[in-house]
């Protein structure tokens, strides 16, 4: 391979470069910080923060109403509101925007046209999504689980199910944002139609929904049966993490081969 | 008065820095670029063509942003699509105006410096902003900048890593005359320092000011290549249609016909004739003499087919 002619360049003294191949120091953190800043718009934080707050209020009202079986009520609430709505919608909004916004508005070129491995860009986007989504989802849901008075099983089950599913959804929707134009409406359609409707039609379809695995984790911790809880705890944790790895690998591949506007 | 930082020189740059070999690109049924071949060396090269001619697609292929459907693009001997390393030697000023929300000019250029692995990104960013005569300490966000200021910052991010190949897609669009002058001067300085500077434009006069080698692209094909004057001559050699308004239009037209500067004449009005000529240089010289001979006052001499599209159509027809 012919060596680029940069070796022939005489640079100003302060600007001489010594660089490692495809791994500029600080590149990951620079992209990460940039994406956190561009993703976390006031409108997004406010609307999804309010949704999370709504969960806390409902959790509180369930707790003060002294239900007959707080564990059962709390498990169904965390599943129906948290795992089925708050987790997928919040991760979709942020993770699909992480590189999706840059793809759509044309600013991706300022990241793509640098000697930085595409996997680093994808990992930075994924990490930025996690940084925003984990507290935005985890804090209100765990708080709601505490306020329902369902006991430590509900709290730890909620924390584990949220952690695993946020990781999986963030990776999936990061790839989604790179692959699909107008990722938000298409992602909502996936959440509503596939996870909310088709997956509930049968066991085979259910296993193809991430919701099934987060429900399995929650159900294993609390002992409360949930409709899509089809897997043991280990499978419920491993499968979403595998999905996350595959989604990030696919996102990297897409970023390598797709046209950049 | 502030001092503009100096650009480093490339010692003994290779004669050929960019090779485009039989490249075609299509999007669905639309052929954007068809069988284009050229090479580019150090200095300023202008890519001239009307809107939609395929200039941006070619520039995007030079930077690896899109792959050719057929043919080969090599920048400094490497495939810019596949070889991440060559991106260190390429700087691009894209056509789109969007920049990252919430960043200042310094943050924007420093990000580029960090991603290129420069040891002192902050100083490099300040240097690059200095080269384009932008204040590095301006606290305003980029999104509040005028188009011209943003354009200069985009140039700064493209040169911050001192690339040997610089690609600029319509960089003068939206700039005021003073800013244009400054930019053209910067392109000259970059070219004279041994860098390969490729600038696209759809404005003929703009390209004239680059005073450079020109690649004319029309309908996705390479219509002409060469020095600007050669292209200008080629354009002048085509048949021209010119309207002449005069108080003695008929007599002026007669004199032009008799002198061989016109090959056809059509009377439009009592004071207006349309002249066909295939010797526009001769016509330019002959029109004044013809008016003097006819004792006529020239009121208007207007080329009727001097728009770029017709020029490009003619050049493509010649291929």
Image (spheres, helix red, strand yellow):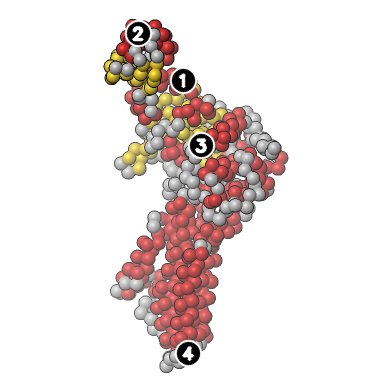
Residue tagged 4:
A64
Please state, as top left, top right, bottom left or bottom right, where the N terminus of chain B lies in the image: top right
Which image quarter holds the C terminus of chain B? top left
Secondary-structure class at tag 4? helix
Label 3: chain letter: B
To which quarter of the image does residue A13 belong?
top right
Residue occupying the point 51% across, 74% down: A138
Which residue matches tag 3?
A: B172
- Would you place residue B250 above or below residue A24 in this image? above
Q: Which residue is mark 1?
A: B230
Say left or right for B247 vs B8.
Answer: left
Q: Is circle 2 on the same chain as circle 3?
A: yes
| Labels 2, 3: front one | 2
> Is residue A52 placed above or below B62 in the rendered structure?
below
Q: Closer to the camera: disc 2 or disc 1?
A: 2
Q: Residues within 10 Å of mark 2 (few under 14, many from 20)?
A: many
């Amino acid at each position: 391979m012919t060596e680029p002619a940069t070796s022939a360049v005489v640079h100003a003294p302060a600007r001489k470069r010594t660089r490692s191949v495809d791994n500029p120091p600080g590149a990951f953190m620079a992209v990460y910080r940039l994406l956190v800043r561009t993703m976390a718009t006031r409108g997004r934080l406010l609307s999804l923060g309010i949704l999370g707050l709504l969960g806390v209020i409902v959790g509180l009202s369930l707790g003060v109403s002294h239900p007959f079986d707080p564990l059962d009520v709390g498990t169904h609430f965390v599943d129906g509101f948290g795992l089925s709505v708050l987790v997928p919608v919040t991760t979709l909004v942020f993770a699909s925007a992480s590189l999706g916004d840059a793809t759509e508005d044309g600013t991706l070129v300022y990241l793509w046209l640098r000697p930085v491995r595409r996997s680093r860009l994808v990992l930075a986007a994924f990490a930025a999504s996690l940084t925003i989504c984990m507290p935005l989802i985890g804090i209100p849901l765990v708080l709601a689980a505490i306020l329902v008075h369902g006991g430590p099983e509900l709290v730890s089950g909620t924390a584990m199910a949220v952690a695993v599913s946020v990781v999986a959804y963030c990776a999936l929707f990061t790839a989604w944002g790179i692959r699909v134009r107008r990722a938000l409406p298409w992602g909502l359609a996936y959440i509503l139609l596939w996870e909310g409707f088709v997956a509930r039609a049968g066991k085979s379809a259910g296993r193809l929904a991430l919701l099934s695995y987060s429900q399995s984790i929650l159900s294993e911790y609390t002992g409360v049966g949930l409709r899509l809880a089809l897997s043991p705890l280990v499978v419920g944790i491993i499968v979403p993490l595998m999905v996350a790895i595959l989604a990030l690998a696919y996102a990297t591949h897409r970023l390598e081969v797709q046209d950049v506007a | 008065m502030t001092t503009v930082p100096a650009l480093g020189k490339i010692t003994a740059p290779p004669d050929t820095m960019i090779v485009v070999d039989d490249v075609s690109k299509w999007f669905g049924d639309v052929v954007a670029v068809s069988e284009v071949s050229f090479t580019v060396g150090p200095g300023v090269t202008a890519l001239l063509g009307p809107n939609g001619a395929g200039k941006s697609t070619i520039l995007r292929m030079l930077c690896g942003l899109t792959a050719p459907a057929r043919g080969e693009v090599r920048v400094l001997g490497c495939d810019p699509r596949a070889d991440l390393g060559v991106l260190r030697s390429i700087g691009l000023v894209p056509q789109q105006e969007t920049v990252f929300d919430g960043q200042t000019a310094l943050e924007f250029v420093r990000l580029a410096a960090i991603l290129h692995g420069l040891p002192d990104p902050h100083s490099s960013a300040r240097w690059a902003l200095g080269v384009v005569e932008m204040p590095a300490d301006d606290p305003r966000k980029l999104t509040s900048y005028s188009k011209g200021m943003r354009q200069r910052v985009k140039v700064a991010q493209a040169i911050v890593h001192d690339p040997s190949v610089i690609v600029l897609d319509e960089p003068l669009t939206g700039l005021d005359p003073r800013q244009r002058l400054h930019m053209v001067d910067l392109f000259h300085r970059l070219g004279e320092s041994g860098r390969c500077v490729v600038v696209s434009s759809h404005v003929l006069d703009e390209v004239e000011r680059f005073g450079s080698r020109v690649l004319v692209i029309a309908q996705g094909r390479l219509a002409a290549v060469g020095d600007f004057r050669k292209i200008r001559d080629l354009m002048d050699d085509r048949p021209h249609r010119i309207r002449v308004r005069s108080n003695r239009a008929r007599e002026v037209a007669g004199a032009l016909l008799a002198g061989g500067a016109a090959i056809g004449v059509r009377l439009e009005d009592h004071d207006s004739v349309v002249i066909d000529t295939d010797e526009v240089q001769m016509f330019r010289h002959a029109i004044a003499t013809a008016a003097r001979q006819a004792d006529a006052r020239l009121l208007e001499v207007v080329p009727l087919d001097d728009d770029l599209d017709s020029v490009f159509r003619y050049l493509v027809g010649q291929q």
